[in-house]
Image (spheres, rainbow, N blue to C red):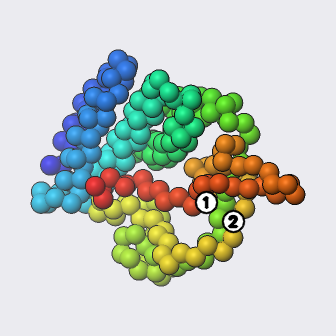
Amino acid sequence: MDVEQLEKIANSTFERWVSLCRQEKHSLAKDEAQTLIGLCVETIGGQNEADSETKNAALELGILFRGLQDFNTVYELIKSSNYELDDAQIEKVWVLLWDCKDRVKFSKSHYANAVLNILLEKIKLLEKQIDEYAGSAIYTSAEIDCSVICSVCRADYRSCDHFAGQIYNGHLCSRTPIDLRLVNFAAVELPEDPRNRLWPWKTHEAERGDLVLENCLILRSFRLDDFLDK
C-alpha cells in the first residue's frame, strides 16, 4: 500500500464517520475509526513493507482517527442519563476533551479538513459548560526530577539526532521521562497539562485555611500515538 491508497481509504472512512456522527450514532462511528486505526497500525508495524513516507502518513492518520474516537466517547458519556449527576463522568469527559483536542490540533497540520475546525469549536463549547458547572479552574503542577530519553532511538534525548514532534519511519519522536521522582507540586491557574484539574468536590479547606486535596491527580501520562501499544 502506498500513501495515495491509504489516504483514499482514510477519506472514505472519514466521510462515513462524519455521516454517522450527524446521525448521533457514535458507537458505530467509533467502529469506523477503529477500522482505519487498525489499518494504520498494520501499515506501520506489519509485514507489508510500506516505505517511510507511507508509514509516516499512517501515523498521522492514526492519530487523527484516535482523536475522532475520543470525540465519540465524549458524546456517548454526555448523552448518558446520569452525566450531569456523576462527577466522575465529568472528570472523564474533561480528560477526553483534552486528548481529543491535542490529537485534532496535531492532525490539522497534516490533514486539512473544515470538519476539524468544527470539532475544536464543539470541544471549546463543552469545556465552557464544564467550567460553568465546576467553577474557576485550578490545576496541579508537578516538579519532577527525571532523565529524558528519545522515544525513537531510546538514547539520551540531549545527545540523539531526533526532534520531538517529528515523525521518523512511522514513529513520533517525544521526550520520554524515566526514573521519575516527585520533588514538589503546586496548585496553579496556568498549567502545563490541563488534564490535571483540581475539582471542587475533591478539595476542601482545613481549619487553618490550608487547601486539602483528596484523590487528585498530580501527574498524568498521555501520548498522541497510544494506539500503537494496543
> Could you give the CA–CA distance between mark 2 and mark 1, rounded to whole angstroms?
7 Å
As displayed, is residue 99 above or below residue 45? above
- Where residue 136 sits, quadrant-wise, is top right
Instruction: Provide the secondary structure element on which disc 1 rests.
Output: loop
User: In the image, which disc is placed on residue 46?
Assistant: none
For the C terminus, which image quadrant? Answer: bottom left
In the image, is 99 to the left or to the right of 132? Answer: left
**Amino acid type indicated by mark 2:** Phe
Residue 109 appears in the figure: no
In the image, is 10 to the left or to the right of 195? Answer: left
Q: How many labels does the image show?
A: 2
Task: List x then y, in percent, for residue 110.
Answer: 40, 45
In the image, is 219 to the left or to the right of 204? Answer: left
Disc 1 target residue: 218
Instruction: Provide the secondary structure element on which disc 2 rests.
Output: strand
As displayed, is residue 101 above or below residue 223? above
User: In the image, which disc is placed on residue 185?
Assistant: 2
